[in-house]
Amino acid sequence: MSGIITARPAATAIALLATAMFAGAASGCFRAQARAVPEMPALDAPAPPPRVVETVEKTPLESSPVGPAVPDERAPRVEAATKPDASPRPQQAPEALIVPEEGPPAPPATVLQTTPPGGEVELERAIRALLARAAANLNNIDYQRLHPDAQAQYDQAKRFISQTEDAIVSKNFPFAHNLADKAATLASQLAGR
């Protein structure tokens, strides 16, 4: 019987070892994987352009009550880089004040309009009709009986109506039409509930 007792721990150990190897193989630990990163060619960046810094020579003011100008020691010193083909520029006299010639007055600036001039009246009439329909729908709704989400939509429709009025005053008719359409849509949806 002693042989059977000693054989069991060995069989159990072999079973555990086999299970561990199977679990390791299943998880991919024992799988050979070659992961190589391909070498990318080096990028050839162009050389930066040459920097040219011009220096300005200051001349002391002879009529200055303080005396000749002294260079500021705190100011950074800049040295001029020279180009191989650079030639010194001749000193130019300051240009005289150029006075424009008298001619016919310039025409007044035109106003940018998104609607044709005659179409503003018709567009405003259509916007007012949308507003009237939205207001009529909202007036037929009992605000207190509405669900909180519906009350938020009711308030939004009222804001759209107010914003539409402001847009009409500022003559922004496309924006006013868009807002009036939104107000009418929300009001009709609320009235249908």
Image (spheres, rainbow, N blue to C red):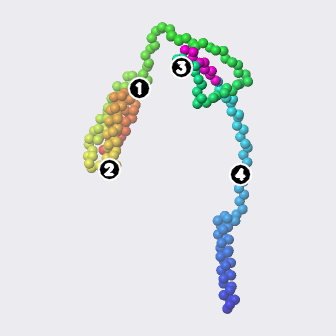
Give the image quarter of residue 155. top left
Callout 1–callout 4 Cβ contact below 8 Å: no
**Is 57 in the magenta?**
yes
- What residue is shown with label 1? 115
Q: Bounds of the magenta span?
A: 55-63
Callout 3–callout 4 Cβ contact below 8 Å: no
Q: CA distance from mark 2 to mark 1?
A: 39 Å
Of mark 3 and mark 4, the one earlier in the sequence is: 4
Q: Secondary structure at mark 3?
A: loop
Residue 148, labelled with which disc?
Answer: 2
Q: Residue drawn at (32%, 36%), measured in percent from left and top? A: 162
Of mark 1 and mark 4, the one earlier in the sequence is: 4
Residue 32 image point, x, y percent: 72, 62
Number of callouts in the render? Answer: 4
- The amino acid type, in three-letter code, at marker 4 is Val
- What residue is shown with label 3? 66
Can you see residue 32?
yes
Dot 4: within a 10 Å radius of its alpha carbon, few (fewer than 14), some, or many (20 or more) residues? few
Left or right? Give the position of 176 relative to 13: left
- The amino acid type, in three-letter code, at marker 3 is Val
- What residue is shown with label 4? 37
Q: CA distance from mark 3 to mark 1?
A: 66 Å
Name the front one of labels 3 and 4.
Answer: 3
